[in-house]
Amino acid sequence: MDFNMKKLASDAGIFFTRAVQFTEEKFGQAEKTELDAHFENLLARADSTKNWTEKILRQTEVLLQPNPSARVEEFLYEKLDRKVPSRVTGGELLAQYMAEAASELGPTTPYGETLIKVAEAEKRLGAAERDFIHAASASFLTPLRNFLEGDWKTISKERRLLQNRRLDLDACKARLKKAKAAEAKATLWNDEVDKAEQELRVAQTEFDRQAEVTRLLLEGISSTHVNHLRCLHEFVESQTTYYAQCYRHMLDLQKQLGRFPGTFVGTTEPASPPLSSTSPTTTAATMPMGPSVAGLAPPAEAALCLEEVAPPSSGTRKARVLYDYEAADSSELALLADELITVYSLPGMDPDWLIGERGNKKGKVPVTYLELLS
């Protein structure tokens, strides 16, 4: 009991000394040991990394789960170390409503049939969204959380210890200064000066040791940046995969609804190019505005007879097929992903289409399904 009481009294004394030193520094009444410029830069970079990591983490959580109530629920499950229950995505819920509406309004009517087709597409979009959320959480959110809840807490703890060691050091410097001032007035203070010098040496050693530990942890922020860079690449890859799946699902839906890949009726601006993994030495085909209605071709193209078509003497190019394509009629050429074909254009053709040749077969092919090779 006596030992515990003495320890509590000692801790209280140390805390009081630090509080006095900190207060006097704030009012400019005590000297403060300054850290070197490199150390201060390390501290600033660490703080900046922590602040931006928190912001990026929170906004990514909003991106993946816009519903704040759902985010709170998922947070509580994680803190309780329990598995987060599977949640229906917005696309899957919309698909369910559309399917139920088609069943009640008449699945054989034009409206009901279209509802069913769109419901199936929305269901696939919802499944793709679920996969994206899972991949992004595992490859991006989890590493960011681990940094904030692991490495950063360790850094913060060591920084607090360094702050305490600095306060102790400066308090020892102040006591030594007072002892020397008293010694100048009387010779009875020699023992006090020796004691103050000894305390200062101990405090300086502890401060230097803690400063080195903290410095090593702060320099480790560079490794954190490298790890976050890798995670960022994985996040972009998962997002690219997700949007590519969405694009393909919507292309399939457009075909089922009787439209060519491209823009809807009345659109005057070109659509975005399809997602593809092109190398720096190739030029990906862009996606110009497609025909407004399936089967409708410009007058010059409507009279085109493929048997009479001959490739031009110059202007043919090789193209890599990005996606499978099923020919809508005998004038089109069916395509298989990753195959190479020869393509060229003829005067008067719709700019969204080219003539494609593979062996002794030829037909029209949509530009949006091709990657033109330079």
Image (cartoon, rainbow, N blue to C red):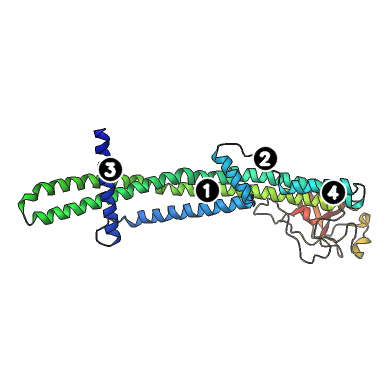
Instruction: Determine which residue is flagged by label 2.
Output: 86
Q: Nearer the viewer, residue 173 or 286?
A: 173
248 lies left or right of 294: left
Q: Earlier in the sequence, mark 1 or mark 4?
A: 4
Label 4 vs label 2: CA separation? 25 Å
Callout 4 environment at 10 Å: few (<14), some (14 to 19), or many (20+)? some
Q: Nearer the viewer, mark 1 or mark 4?
A: 4
For marks 3 and 1, the one nearer the N-term is 3
Q: Amino acid at mark 2?
A: Ser
For the residues labelled 1 and 4, say whether their Cβ atoms are less than 8 Å apart. no
- Residue 228 is marked as 1
Mark 1 → mark 4, Cα distance in angstroms: 46 Å
Relative side of 281 to 51, left or right = right
Tell me the CA gap for discs 3 and 1.
Answer: 40 Å
Q: Secondary structure at mark 3?
A: helix
| Label 3 Cα neighbours within 10 Å, binned few <14 / some 14-19 / many ≥20 | few
Quadrant into which the C terminus falls: bottom right
Q: Which residue is mark 3?
A: 11
Q: Which residue is mark 4?
A: 101
Q: Please name which of the two marks, 1 or 2, marks the residue nearer to the observer.
A: 2
Upstream in sequence: badge 1 or badge 2: 2
Front residue (pair 318, 137) = 137
The residue drawn where x is 57% and y is 42% is: 76
Residue type marked 3: Asp
Q: Give amino acid for label 1.
A: His
Badge 2: how crowded within 10 Å, few (<14), some, or many (20+)?
few
Local secondary structure at mark 2: loop
Q: Is 251 located above or below residue 345 in the figure? A: above
Name the front one of labels 2 and 3: 3
Quick check: marks 4 and 2 in contact, CB under 8 Å?
no
Location of the N terminus by quadrant is top left
